[in-house]
Image (cartoon, helix red, strand yellow):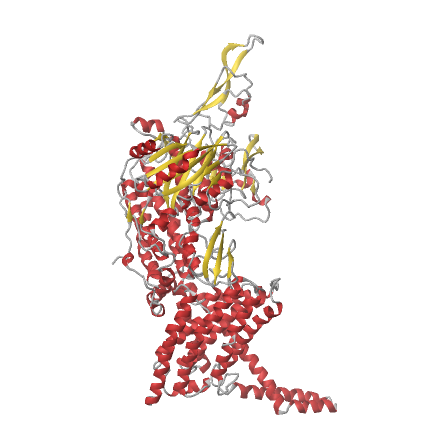
Amino acid sequence: MSNLYIELTNFTEWLLGLVASILDWTKLGFLSDFGEWLQTAPVVDFVSTLLVVAIFLITAMMFGLCFIWQERKFLGRFMDRRGTQVGFLGFFQNFADGIKVILKEHIVPKDSDHRLFELAIFAYLASTFMLFGCIPFSDNFYVINVNLAVLLGVAIFAFGPFSILIGGWSSNNKFTLIGGMRAAAQLIALEIPLLLCIVSVVVMTGDLSFVGIVAWQEQNIWLIVPLCIGALTFFIAAIGESERIPFDLPEAEAELVEGWATEYGDVRWGLQMASDYFRAYILSGLFTMLFLGGWAGPEFIWAEAWYLAKTFIVFFFFIWVRAATVRIRTDQILKMGWRRLLPMAVINLLIAVALKVAGVF
Amino acid sequence: MSSDEMWINMGPQHPFNHGLWNLRVKLKGETITQAEPIIGYLHRGWEKMVENRTYSQIVPLADRLCYGSSLSWNHLYCLTAEKLYGIEAPDRAKYIRVAVLELQRITSHLTWLMAVGTDLGSYTIMTWSIRERELFLDLLCKLSGARMTYNYCRIGGVRNDYPENYERDVLRVLDEFEKRLRDLESLMDENEPFLMRTVGISKMDGKTAMNLGLTGPIMRASGVDMDLRKLDPYEVYADMKFEVCTHTDGDVYARYRVRMDEMRESMKIVRQALSETPAGPIRVKVPRCPPKGNVVCHVEDPRGESLMYMVSDGSEKPYRLKVRSPNFVNLSASPPMLVGFKISDVPAIMGVMDMCIGETDR
Amino acid sequence: MSQVIVYDTPDRSVEDIARDLKSKFPAVDVLKAAPKRLHVQVPRDISFEVCKFMKEGLSFEHCSCVTTVDYIDHFTVVFHISSWTNHILSEVLVDLPRDDPTVDSITPLWGGANWHEREAYDLMGIVFKGHPDLRRIMMPEEFKFHPLRKDFIVGRRV
Amino acid sequence: MRIEERRYTKADHFRATGYILKTMQVTFKGAIRATKHRPCTILYPWEKLLYPDNYRGRPGIVLERCIGCGRCAKECPNQCIEMIDFQDAEKGKVKRPQVNVGRCMMCGNCAEACPTNAMIVTPEFELASYSRGGLIFDPVKLQHPHKPGYEVNYEFALLSEMKSGGEVKTYAKNDTTVHDTIVLDGSKCISCSRCAKTCPAGAIEMADTGEVNPKTKKPIKQPKFDNAKCVVCEQCVDVCPKSCLSVKEVL
């Protein structure tokens, strides 16, 4: 299978050529010129990129939504119940929910900071959607493949806490404020171990692009074997980053009604909820990419399928942990983040450096 | 109030409070410096209402005091009325009552465990304990015809005898439940996050607990061996062989532990009561109007000491019926339990209290 | 680790305690001294002293309940006070005149009586002197009646 | 080791990362079990729990048995039963219960009080209606196919027999030999025969007392009670203008 970009560039060229020929047929001089301009390289590039992004985003979102379905079904089994039942095997539950939240009224709290309130949620969602772009499905199916893709992804990730904090503050509600503060503190506390784990991977592979990291793992060994401590740390920190039980304190519904998103309604809330799963999808994708060899696998099915299968398996463990534990307190999360996960990540980094220096790989 | 403190209303509509009540907490950061429970949102005027009902009509109303342990309220009302009438239920009825009351205690504790599960964020605990509770609900449904509000005790006995093969069914359920209880326990006891949330939280020593009027599992978790089934035996509890479950830590974990152990003891009592049930009548006919007088009666509810004080003026309706709900007092003692802990501990502390607003507000 | 406080066998009999109470307060009227039950009638002015003596001298460590009954011509406040040590549930009846329903609060002795007294104040209008926080508990603050009194007509629009 | 012996005095935060393995194992076992067998939940609108025959849903009535005594209405704690006028095909205008199911709390006391077992508890529990009127069940709507388990029967003993220490017999609910009796205070009776007219069981008969009214020279009739027919509904007691009837309880 050839590259998505190449395929779509060919398609775009054909499409724009078709448009240009239609314009040419009109025998109007300025339209023919316009048709010629359409066939120039920058326009073709622009249009094909737009198409790539649209296709990629829709595919990734669909798989993100599949995560919600997966969680509903698997969690149901863990709890000895059936999970969602809407439509065939419950596949239509997400769409039913989506239609429901879209039809809801948009409510802004009276004393809130309107502009920030509206802005924060979109900043949060935008950061989530941008993250989609950073994670390739395979070395052929991706949006960007810059050399610093890992750094770009992490930088976008770090944008989340700001929007959460702003959203929590601008809602003018005590619950959202506490939720926002908690979210910010927790995300920052867990981001550093997360980053250190990524750094160790980078040290091992010597590459900052996902394609390079996966290629290295394909040649040598899946990194979960030498960097098992790092993988564990990353996994725990990833659960915390995606605000899932046992680390779902920012929206612990038992004490803070819905955390920082309490005042959000309608489709904003719906997308925020979906965004939690998108982030979980991205984090399990990252885990797959960094430690499980990404799309590497025997070639009897597509590389993308390998990648997705591994991602779903990683997310299964997320669900399993959620089914098994209760949520822990904020201070305990922070202590864990700073006192346990950080040293573990540092040790992992040292192991990676030692392995590299010793020339094992 | 300094500028770094704030009051938070947790309630009356809040995911953590099971029922309709309000917990106002003053926070400094995330630490609680002051707490004030506010109740009355579900006040139905039960005590006034029963003054306009005949004695036999109050029996199903007593169920409605608490949906979680309706049978123990029902039984307490019947026991109090029997004392007022100066009669005693037949022996068989007493044994049936004890067996059913203990089944109800297990049901109530499982409902409580469900609430604890949701409060602490583990929905597995919730669904599993609901599933186990279903076994007992089916048993009680088979016996009394209803799943929650049984209306089973009668003044002077019980409504009906055991259905066919009931003893066999109960023993089967108990055997099955014993196995499942072990699984259920490992969800909490072997679960480090659960221990992190519960151990050392809201410690209370026995003397303080006694002064605050706490009763029931919370009191026993503080190391006070107080159980009215032993101290002031009613029905045939004096003949039953069981231990009072206590714990000395006095924290949330101890309170959880006491209830789990109590379920095991309850199973013991059920087995004994079933095997020793004598033959005989199950109900005596009682007169319509009791003699004049007043009577007090207290029993060990799943939540603690519940007491009824009944005054009769010789008519067919009670003159005054006062209900002492264990939760009412336990809730009034919650501020000292909460102060100094984090807002995240509120669900843990209040969750193990087994809140039931129906009986608190009456 | 603290030890479990065990209440095995009662230390003293009910008659014993009734005698003690009677000798200390001659005004106290012992109505009934059945096994595990002690019913006493106490004049209003010494109710607090009696309760204090019961707590400190007779080891009644638990306040079960505070009830009020409206007998039309007078109110009766009933303190149910238990002694786990002696396995006794005692009933202390205090009669109050209807025009001045005031009695000493026992909340300073047993913290558990706090909400019971608030409830009695709310629903029956009994004023407990010395209560730390005597407010309405069930009814809203602006409610003007005491609904458990017999002269409160059920169904009246308030 | 008993579990309560274990002491968790120091919560070790590191253990939180590793020590949920046992719980994970237990939940996984549960998931396997739920997949192998069926999950314990049921698909409600299609599947329903099997209820025993004595399940207490809404009250129902067997109209042929009802005599209109009104004991159900008296016993109902929520006062949701009302005796309404009903045109019966055979008996003409009679009183029959109408139940406001919206108020009913399914306690089954009406069926327990019914002396003829006409009032039954049915296992019907899906009672939602679009209007309040739809929740008011008139006698015709209240009818329900009858099964023996729907009746509420109980057996009771007599207090006097239990106290005497002799043989304790148990009596069925509507055993006419031991139920309460209506007593007449003949000195007050004015022979209005309202009680006989109102008696739903036809247990009262105006019988000659053998005396003659000195003014009208007509024989004085007073009610005579047939205990085998009486159901102790006390309608006669309620209707008596001179309150000369009273209930004598058998204990």
Q: Measuring from the top left, give residue A330's x and y in whole percent.
A: 43, 66
Is residue B100 left or right of A164 when viewed as pictured? left
| Viewer-side residue, D92 vs B118 | B118
Residue B204 visible? yes
Q: Measuring from the top left, give residue B143's x and y in whole percent.
A: 38, 44
Q: Residue furthest right?
A: A28
Q: Measuring from the top left, give residue B325's x and y in whole percent.
A: 42, 44
A246 to B140, vertically: above or below? below
Residue drawn at (49%, 48%) of the image: B39
**Total marks in image:** 0
A259 to D157, vertically: above or below? below
Q: Residue furthest left?
A: D1
- The image quadrant where one finds the C terminus of chain A is bottom left
C106 to A242, vertically: above or below? above
Is residue A107 left or right of C70 when viewed as pictured? right
| Viewer-side residue, B198 vs D114 | B198
Q: Measuring from the top left, give residue C90's x and y in whole percent.
A: 36, 36
| Viewer-side residue, B331 vs B107 | B331
| Viewer-side residue, B193 vs B77 | B193
Residue A242 visible? no
